[in-house]
Image: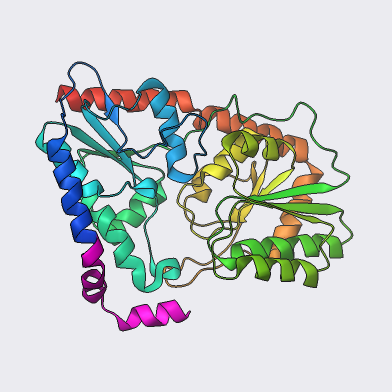
Amino acid sequence: MIADRLARLLPRAVRRVLRAPVDVPARLWFRHRLRAAEFRLATGGPVLSYGAALPPKAGALVQGGRVKLTHLDRVFPARADSFNVLYLVSSAIPPHALELVRFAKARGVKFVWNQNGVAYPAWAGPFTDDVNDPMRALRREADYVVYQSAFCRASADRLLGRAACPSEVLFNPVDTALFSPAETPPPLTELRLLAMGTHTYADRVLVTLRCLAELHRTGRAARLTIAGPMQWAGADEEVRRAISDFGLREHVTLRPAFSQSEAAEMCRAHHVLLHPKYMDPCPTVVIEALACGLPVVGPASGGLPELVDAGLGRLLPVPEDWERMHSPDSGAMAAAVAEIAADWQGFSTRARQRALALFRAEPWVARHGEIFEQLLGA
């Protein structure tokens, strides 16, 4: 709150001036390095660069927007010195991306932009334009835009302006071999709930604790795993205090950041994914859970209704509000969990079927190959 108030006192132009002593020399040095590089435009089929967004070491932890790049990289391995397609993701923008894009395009490289969500006042507050400006500039340079959901396209059009280049919607992919159902699911005598991802604001976590407390109040045996970093000020203390206040110390497990294989193992060890994030554009964690046969409970907002229908879980009503965040009612979440538990195997089977039909990585990569060939042919 204090940071927001201070930020509101500083116009965006002033914040840029304050950053200039660091930003300008860094950009100039990056441009010098680009000009000195021995770049050669690749010929023939698609040869890709991801702007060094992928970690260089095998086995390194990959999270967020970078996960989807690993699927492309298996078929189109990254090249730094000779490529003809530059592919960047809005949720994993590398440093000095605009300089890189302009350097590459001036040398004949095609630029494909993968657009996730955008900033809006409800979560970004006075920094909304600071977050959106780089995406706006990069999308303007794109030869093709891949939107992660129809909501991603609509929100980008709303807050970044309409894009002039061709585009299409491709839901995020999942490795359905890695993310697969457990051979023997955990017994339903104690419901195992999972809240997984990067938790950037308090109520995304606190509402799952309230849901668990409500299940206990109604006599339902249940436990909750909260996995992933909690990234708001005082998060650890606030969550642990809430766990204590609700009397849930023996029923909640906190886990730090996790790898893809660990995420799959966690999904298989639970029954239901609680994903209360408001207006989430295209949550990969939801797609991974569905692939493991986990039904989903969350808000009917953002891109979630495009991924989860009534047969795969329960999406609960929340208002559409670009100025304030909203969470589903915790009592309604608990009732949804109980309803799913009554036919868990049916929900689980349908979730897996949905993932195989819509979210497999292979068709996603193949469609990208067609886009690359189309751009290079043009």
- Where residue 173 sits in the image (x, y, percent)? 48, 33
- Where residue 303 sits in the image (x, y, percent)? 47, 50
Colour pattern: rainbow
Q: Please, what is the dominant secondary structure of the magenta stretch?
A: helix
Count the marks: how many?
0
One can see residue 139 in this view: no
Q: Is residue 232 above or below residue 66?
A: below
- Where residue 209 sits in the image (x, y, percent)? 72, 63
The residue segment tinted magenta is: 1-22
Instruction: Pick the residue in front: 131 or 59.
Output: 59
Kindly give the residue lying farthest to the top in the view shown: 44
Instruction: Pick the residue in front: 150 or 115.
Output: 115
Which residue occupies 29% across, 27% down? 79
Which residue occupies 41% across, 33% down? 56
Which residue occupies 29% across, 36% down? 87
Which residue occupies 35% across, 69% down? 127
Q: Is residue 8 left or right of residue 200?
A: left
Locate residue 46: give its quadrant: top left
Q: Is residue 47 left or right of residue 117?
A: left
- Where residue 67 sits in the image (x, y, percent)? 47, 37
Instruction: Pick the residue in front: 377 or 98.
Output: 98
One can see residue 235 in this view: yes
Q: Quadrant of the C terminus?
A: top left
Q: Is residue 28 left or right of residue 257?
A: left
Locate residue 328: give its quadrant: bottom right
Q: Is residue 30 above or below residue 302?
A: above
